[in-house]
Image (cartoon, helix red, strand yellow):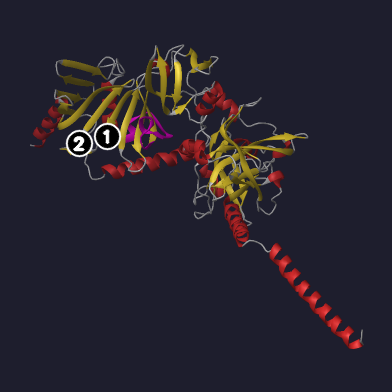
Amino acid sequence: MSNKGKQNLFVRLVLTLGCVSIFSTITITSAWAVDPQVIETEQARIETVATISKATVCVFGSKGGGGGSGVLISPDGYALSNFHVTEATGTFMKCGLDDGKLYDTVLVGLDPTGDVALIKLLGREDFPYAPLGNSDQVQVGDEVYTVGNPFLLAADYRPSVSLGIVSGTHRYQYPAGTFLEYTDCIQVDAAINPGNSGGPLFNDRGEVIGINGRASFEKRGRVNTGAGYAISINQIKMFLDHLKSGRVVDHATLGATLVSDEDGTLYVDQILETESVYRRGLQSRDEIISIAGRTLTSVNQFKNILGIFPEGWPVKLAFRQEGETQNILVRLPALHSEQELAEIVKPKKSMHPAMGEVEKQPTGPEEYQHLYEAKPGYANYYFNRVQQERVLQAYRSTVQNLEMTEAAQNKSVWVVTGTEAKGAKYELVLAPTAIGFRIGRGIYLQPLQGEAGIDEPEASGGLLIALHQLRVWLTNGPSGFTDNYHWGSEPLDGEGPLVDVLVTTWENMESRWLFNQETGQLVGLDSRRVEDIEACELRFGSYQQYEQVFFPEQIRVSYSGTSLVTLNTEEIKVNQPAAASENKDAKVEEQK
């Protein structure tokens, strides 16, 4: 082959190899190109992490002892954490945020059994916060983030983030040598290590669906095995108003124990005759069908569901007795006694090493010391007074256009007349020394001295004494009672709108006043003459002006789940006592 031919062959070979190289490069580049959707998903994840990190709190003791995590849930500084975290830090603590700043923080309320604490960061009213999600919508396989301060690594207050999935829902974690009971919780494989306690569990939308608190560990309790547990946010929502009241909150029990037979049917084994569930008809060997609308299939599930409710919460219970299905509304009793709760929250001398040393009870900065008030039964009584004032201010706004004249105050006699729902006439006399009630052919009398608290009319739960307390409230508010406090909130009659609950004491009788959370209106009163009996329940319509007083235009009365009567108000006259009238006439004569 000539030199020219060799040159042509060489050129063709080079061109061929070049084309192959270019084609290969294009092919390889195409094969390794990243799908734009992957990049978009990754960027969305980065943005979500940046957002949720801003609301995550790194918790430390005021002097550096203790520590854990938390999450802000409102712009005014309220944040959730674990009880066992604040148990180590004390009443006042320090909390660091993603902005690198450290904030003074005060304890608000405690749920020791559920391992939840509410704290409040101070110094701002515009804190970044995370929205609360719906943990009932969580499904196995959902992506989740655990965010917090594992091993107290966040020296710069920037939290650590771990990505994982939901491994299980509605899990039940036994106390296992401690009083901490995790019911209806969420199991995840995202890392939950010592120091993550109290931190948030987020869904992929950046909503808080749980509070991290417990994990399975090995190697002396330091290494997570991939099974972590978070308290469901829906459970915490039911306790939130109780925690804001500054109380040490208890969980509920039923007042009965259950057993199951071979096919899984649940029966009442033992029942306390002093509890509401017994007084409303449940008996030993009755078959339990559902509680709070959730069908029961095992004793373990029963404990799991029951554990999500605060003490005193009203729930619907369905059971079968002698082949007949019955539905009742019961108020759940407390799981612990007051003494047991006091012992649980008593400051400890030592804690788990991972949580640091327990600090002595700090007094907090001088400018914030007024934000803490010690009182038995409370984590911080100061916040109970805050909630009382909030409820009362909203209530006053609903009656600000109504008048209670001076003549209608304590020593006057109110004569209320009207008709009950079936058309019968009634007359109610509210006097300073006694209450009289006439309806149809029945005449009833309730003395207010010596025999206060009798059940009159019989089997009403003490209707007349309840109506007297209503008058006391309308004329004097909470100052007319020997004691009062904010209890929290509950759904009205188990399934109605949320109502704030104020509890008052009068002549050793405890009453619960129910205020619609949205409007502030006083919508109900549950008055109980003595412990271990059912309350007389009054439900009020709107309020009207009747000459010198304002009063509900309708009062619905029920007792032990049975509706008794509905009273429709038509007229109210205010009379002065004879002695007062005589004194007034005498003064007029003297002036003449």
User: Residue 138 location in percent, x, y?
Assistant: 54, 41
Asked if 329 appears above or below 53 in the picture, the reply is above
Q: Can residue 359 be seen by looking at this rendering?
A: yes
Using residue 99 as the reference point, say whether residue 307 is left or right of it.
left
Q: In the rendering, which numbered label is found on residue 223?
A: none
Q: Can residue 381 be seen from the camera position used here?
A: no
At a point 57% along the width and 49% down the height, the residue shown is: 204
Q: Nearer the viewer, residue 530 or 482?
A: 530
Q: Establish if 498 lies above or below 443.
A: below
Magenta stretch: give its range: 476-499
Residue 549, labelled with which disc? 2
In the image, residue 185 above or below residue 54 = above
Q: CB atoms at circles 2 and 1 under 8 Å apart?
A: yes
Quarter of the view holding residue 171:
top right
Q: Position of residue 99 (x, y in %)?
A: 61, 57
Instruction: Tell me residue 156's x, y (percent).
Output: 68, 54
User: Which comes sooner in the sequence, label 2 or label 1?
Assistant: 1
Q: Amino acid at mark 2?
A: Val
Residue hosting label 1: 474
